[in-house]
Image (cartoon, helix red, strand yellow):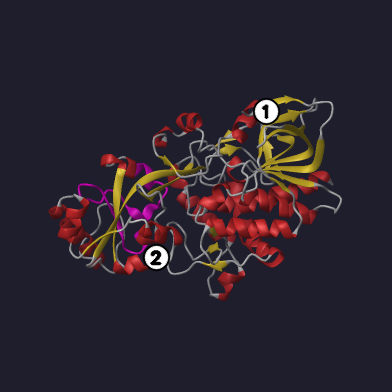
Amino acid sequence: MAEIQPAPSAFEFSADIVIIGAGACGLVAGLAARQDCAEDVSILLLERDRSPSGSTSLSSGFMPAAGTWLQRERGIEDSPDLLLQDLQKKAKGRSHEPLASAVAAASGPVVEWLAKEHGLPFILIDGFLYPGHSVLRMHAMPQKTGAALQAALLEAAGRCDLPIATGQRAEILYRAEDGRISGVGVHTEDGQFQQVGCKVLILACNGYGGNKELVEKHIPEVADAVYFGHAGNQGEAVIWGEKLGAKLADMTGYQGHGSVAWPHGALISWALMMEGGALINKQGQRFSNEHEGYSEQAARVMAQTDKTAFVLFDDRLLELGRSFPDFAEAETAGAVISADSLEALAERLKIPASQLQETLAEMTAFQAGSKADPLGRDFTGQPALGAPYHAIQVTGALFHTQGGLDIDTTARVLDETGQPLPNLLAAGGAARGVSGPDVSGYLSGNGLLTALTLGRIAGQQAAKMLK
């Protein structure tokens, strides 16, 4: 349920700022608001799950940020302008420029703020470039998981005495006669219903990937794909927004992924493809340029026989994969299929040995520079694959949506005429992202990029509204 109702005469209790969602976006919004507000300003996060996790915990936990101290220590030259260029290049110029520019500019400062003010121990991911990024700029917790990032943000919220009410499913927004959102109607885990008043409301409740009806309406190409996001992403922000007269933007944009181990359900890092691995189908053939990005590969894998493909790699890449917890879990679960020769591997995969040998011979020629890849990938720079060989069966998946409520650069929700609604803010998956209207526009890390930057911007704007 996602309803809009007239405001009641009184609320059972109220907070000055209410935030729906306690994933990375909501937590960062709360931390930013707490820092910029007076001590007597009350802030409350409403979280539907008993233990806050959301899409953040399911992600890799990698956030691109430009111009950080970690980059400077490594001698890496980066800037918001370069990040913006990469965003627009990946999105073919269709990322909303004002928002993309604001997000790029806020990326470095939000990471440094979280590190210095709240003790998050960021590291810079090195060793390989993710598709579309000009320089090393992925920042993460030392554990390299989204769950670790979520845990670190929850610890920071605890240190700031930021109240989080869990097991609270927000279902109703109350609108006053002047158009302002005056509160939220919430069902609790134990079946009670509560009405919570507010002066400013921030929607940080992610996207609509878990809502089959909305997915079929806006992105039918992945309606049958595995959904690898949080089940709670039901699109309440979009539904509320439409009923309030808000404008929706980039609703056809989403983040897919072409390498989710199947049937094990573990994410296989795209680093394997960037460092020399390949995707092959059940005919033993490559079918796409793996270096174009992992998001657009979801639909391409889904188009193959049985909607599956195989990640092909060797011992060198096996060791790289083991540095990622998700890969290690997949290997423990038996997802890695190994053989001492291509013939033996083909037999185990039940694919034509002759075609697999031809595919690998072509890749070796591409790597040596004696032949150009007709699919457009540059293989030079990485060693050719060698025995023993390994493979993982994968499928395409929908991770999270990139469209949502249209917002300005201060995270205010806009109506159909481009005017901001009085006291409603949105960030992260609830709002339009910076990937544009197509799956191919998703640059690695865009989800957490907007969650953290727009979360902080929304928290700061909420504080300004109260003042």
Mark 1 lies on residue: 244
Left or right: 270 as drawn, with respect to 342: right
Task: Judge whether residue 71 can be spotted in this image.
Answer: yes
Q: Which residues, given as a range, are shown in magenta?
A: 273-300
Q: Residues within 10 Å of mark 2 (few under 14, many from 20)?
A: some
How far from the left and from the top, in percent, is residue 199?
80, 39
Of the residues shown, which amino acid type is indicated by label 1?
A: Leu
Q: Amino acid at mark 2?
A: Arg
Residue situated furthest right in the rendering: 40
* Residue drawn 33% across the image and 66% down it: 317
Relative vertical location of residue 73 with respect to residue 364 in this rendering, above or below: below
Numbered badge on residue 322:
2
| Disc with the residue nearer the chain's start (2 vs 1) | 1
2 vs 1, front mark: 2
Q: Is residue 331 above or below residue 319?
A: above
SS for dot 1? helix
**Can you tell which quarter of the image residue 408 is in?**
top right
Residue found 51% across the figure and 46% down from its top: 435
Q: Is residue 341 left or right of residue 248?
A: left
Q: Is residue 155 left or right of residue 397?
A: right
Task: Name the residue at the left extreme.
Answer: 354
Q: Nearer the viewer, residue 330 or 366?
A: 330
